[in-house]
Structure formats: C-alpha cells, structure tokens
Amino acid sequence: MYGLCARAADDGAVQRLLDIKRRPAGQALPLFVAGIDQAALIVELTTPARVLAARFWPGALTLVLPRRPSFRTLAAAGATVGVRAPADPVLRELAAELGPLTGTSANRHGRPETHSAADARAQLGDDVDLIVDAPLPATGVASTVVDCSGERTVRILREGAVARDELARALVGVAEIG
C-alpha cells in the first residue's frame, strides 16, 4: 500500500501527517529506523528484540519496546513505541540521513488503503507535498507486530508477514510467545 512519512523528531511534520490522515489523537504511529543501532537510540532493546531484529530486519517485523525518555516524538508519546527497519532500502537510507521516520497508510482514517498514486491523490488531494508513483508488489502483507518489552515473554499483537512459528523458532532458548 502507499504510505505517508514524516521525520519523527519534527513535531510540525508529524502533526501535519496526523492532520492529513485525520487520525484520532492518541493513536501511536510506528517509527522506521535504518537498523538496530538507530533503534537503540530510541528504545530499550531487550534480548528477544535483539534476536528478532537480527533475524528479521530489514523486513516486515515491528517490535514494540519501552521508549527511551530522551527520545520524544508526537508519533509515539506513550511509554512504548513500535520500531521497524523496513525492507525498502530507500526508507532505510532516509532514516539514516534524516533520523527515524514515522509513517502510516496514505488514506484518510477509516477509508480503504491506497494501492496506486492515483488512489492516494484521489483520497488526499493536494494536502500532501509529494506522491512518489512507484510500483507496489502484488503480494504485500502487513508487518507482524510483536511486544518485546519483557525479557522472557513476547506477545504477538498482530500476525502478518512473519508467522508465529517463525518467531517461535527464532526465540528458542531466549523467550516464550505468550
């Protein structure tokens, strides 16, 4: 699907993204990072998170972890934040150059996801500065979201591209899936 992105540390850009999306206040957004080193600046990495990141990043796995108090963003004001090193090398390079990014699907809240530049333009109009017209893979699946805030137990919050059995195999001897 098409997505909206903003530099996570830029409160004005994040607020604009939320306004364009018409997303209700208080719903956290994921952060996209260049890799594990950048994630460590944002969140407290647990052992299970390190194991899963080493196995599945870059890729469609979002890890929910305690946010470091020193990292502030309107995208995730709570105690935890979801971080992911996306498979797309352009997004990772942008995160490396600009700092962590935040993003969400390029559609108005409650409306269908967009799968083309024309769909995104039809829903969002001129509210966005730029739409990159790029082909999307036909088999796109949402990321799996895993709460890794504990050291011995992880919880799958949303199963997606990374299946439960793959997670369980990666975590043998490290943590249980609760």
Image (cartoon, rainbow, N blue to C red):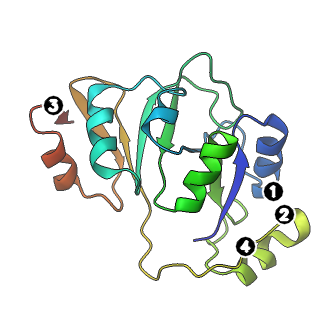
Q: Closer to the N terminus: mark 1 or mark 3?
A: 1
Q: Which of marks 1 and 3 is in front?
A: 3
Residue at 54 percent of width and 78 percent of height: 136
* Disc on res. 128: 2
Q: Which of marks 4 and 2 is in front?
A: 4
Q: Within the image, what quadrant is residue 1 found in?
A: bottom right
Whole-number angstrom distance, CA of label 4 to CA of label 2: 11 Å
Residue where numbered disc 1 is placed: 20
Q: What element carries label 2?
A: loop
Q: What element carries label 1?
A: helix
Residue at 65 percent of width and 39 percent of height: 99
Q: Closer to the N terminus: mark 4 or mark 1?
A: 1
Q: Name the spot of residue 27 as percent of width and height, x first.
A: 63, 41
Whole-number angstrom distance, CA of label 1 to CA of label 2: 7 Å
- Quarter of the rendering occupied by the C terminus: top left
Residue where numbered disc 4 is placed: 132
Whole-number angstrom distance, CA of label 4 to CA of label 1: 17 Å
Whole-number angstrom distance, CA of label 4 to CA of label 3: 41 Å
Q: Closer to the N terminus: mark 1 or mark 2?
A: 1
Residue 129 lies left or right of residue 31; in this view the side is right
